[in-house]
Image (spheres, grey):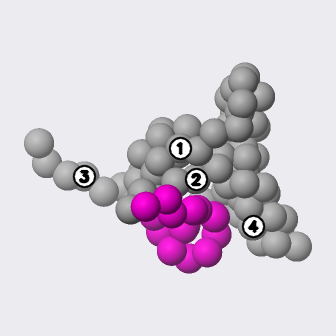
Amino acid sequence: MSNVTITTVLSDDDRAAIVHDVIAAFRQIMAEAQEPRLVDGDRLAELLEVSRPTVDRNRADGVIPSITIGRRRLYRPDAVIDALERQEGSTNA
């Protein structure tokens, strides 16, 4: 299998619409959850429909919060949603 990289340039409006749609879908998934939980980076990437490197990059850049328990880095999906919404608000201001 070969690796293919596709790079596109999105307008600010398109990017904001995508972020809004992802956050809305993620909120619905979390509303269906019975109790708060922690997820690992792979599961967070799956929920957000982004790659694992994107999750790692956003964490390293301080965009999304995480916690470390032992050697595991975990994420609270509700805190990630809040952080993404704050980030979206600050880039649209």
Whole-Å distance between the Cαs marked 4 and 2?
17 Å
> Of the residues under marks 3 and 2, which one precedes in the sequence?
3
Q: Amino acid at mark 2?
A: Tyr
Dividing the picture into quarters, in which one does residue 83 lie?
bottom right
76 or 81, which is in the foreground?
Answer: 76
Q: CA distance from mark 3 to mark 4?
A: 29 Å
- Give the residues in magenta: 54-70
Which tag is nearer the camera, tag 3 or tag 2? 2
Question: Residue 42, position in %: x, y?
Answer: 42, 45
- Mark earlier in primary sequence (3, 4): 3
Q: Which residue is identified by label 4?
A: 87
From this view, report whether residue 72 is shown above or below residue 22.
below
The residue singled out by tag 3 in the image is 4
Circles 2 and 1, Cβ within 8 Å, touching? The answer is yes
Disc 1 target residue:
39
Could you give the CA–CA distance between mark 3 and mark 2, rounded to whole angstroms?
29 Å
Q: Say which residue appears at 75% left-offset and 36% top-offset.
A: 27
Residue drawn at x 63%, y 39% as measured from the top left = 37
Mark 2 = which residue?
75
Which of discs 4 and 1 lies nearer the camera? The answer is 1
Mark found first going from the N terminus, 3 or 1: 3
User: Residue 67 sits in which quadrant?
Assistant: bottom right
Sort mark 3 into few (<14), some (14-19) or many (20+) by Cα contacts within 10 Å.
few
Where residue 1 appears, as percent x and y from the top left, is: 11, 42
Residue 83 in the magenta stretch? The answer is: no
